[in-house]
Image (cartoon, rainbow, N blue to C red):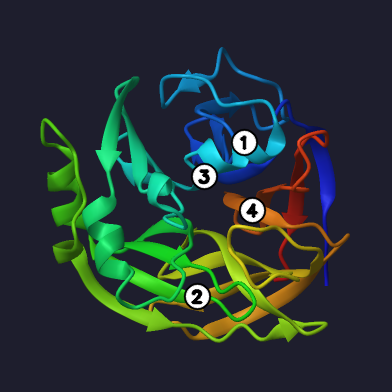
Amino acid sequence: MIVLELVATLGVSAASGLVRVGDELWIVADDELALARYSFDGHAVGEPLVLFAGELPREPRARKRAKPDLEALVALGDGDVLALGSGSRKNRDRGALVRGGRVHGVDLEGLYRRLAQDFDRLNVEGASVLGDRLVLLTRRTGRSGGNTLVHLDLAATRRALATAQPALGGELVVDIVEVALGEEGGAPYGFTDATPDGDALLFTAAAEATDDPYDDGACRGCIIGRADARGRVLTRWSVTPTLKLEGITTFDDHTVLVVADADDAAIASPLLRARLPV
């Protein structure tokens, strides 16, 4: 069992992706259009970086329908950071690349159309670099979707992102690996994020009581685990308190920082510290 320690309460709700960039933490929220930056102790750094122009409706149902649903955030190296929509609806197939302080829109339609051939309900929830691959984590939600590691050719992905109109297509897919995560209280665990850990991935997964990736459900359990490139779960730990962890990044050899989403716009997301058993 891992005990989560509160570091700070953030100025965003629905935090859904977390990466460490130098001495900052970059965070996306699934119901926002901007990326927020924080210090390691949870203080806001500068103004949010707008990823998509416009404004989202304030009314919760309308906001949910309109949002790009940014669920994955990944550092690609050389300062590049990529945010990805979940692909769970047609308006959620776009991303944003931050390069040199500038934002470039990324078309994900071709890639997600290819992945939709393998999933009844696509739901991309995390991403991480692993060796020469960019790994996307898809999430099982109840009876829908599946927990998989989608391996993309990293070099080819970077070349695609370097074009004048960045777009990721299905030809980037190298392999799709299923992962068995089990369940909690009758609710299957589903991936929520991952970060590199040597030749493996550190991941978070939540057991959410819903069969629809569009609708939220009660969180019945959450785990932090380690998996290899072939999808073998090497170790896993339950966390307390039970929060739906949606972002993870390493802090030092045995400590990770995580963010949680309460699925309630009135509840700010916490930044938490977790020490991993040696």
In primary-sequence order, the first of circles 3 and 2 is 3
Q: Distance between the residues labelled 3 and 1?
A: 13 Å
The quarter of the picture where the N terminus appears is bottom right
The three-letter code of the residue at mark 3 reads Asp
In primary-sequence order, the first of circles 3 and 1 is 1
In primary-sequence order, the first of circles 3 and 4 is 3
The quarter of the picture where the C terminus appears is bottom right
Q: How far apart are marks 3 and 4 (CA)?
A: 13 Å
177 to 205, vertically: above or below? below
Q: Distance between the residues labelled 1 and 4?
A: 23 Å
Give percent across and percent down for residue 40.
Answer: 66, 32
Helix, strand or loop under label 4: strand
Is there any visible trace of residue 162 in the rendered image?
A: yes
241 to 148, vertically: above or below? above
Give percent across and percent down for residue 89.
Answer: 45, 54
Q: Which residue is drawn at 57% across and 31% down?
A: 32
Q: Residue at x 78, y 42 (%)?
A: 264
Q: Name the residue under label 2.
A: 145
Q: Name the residue under label 3.
A: 69
The three-letter code of the residue at mark 4 reads Glu
> Dot 1: within a 10 Å radius of its alpha carbon, few (fewer than 14), some, or many (20 or more) residues?
few
Q: Which of pointers 1 and 4 indicates the residue nearer the eye?
A: 1
Q: Name the residue under label 1.
A: 62
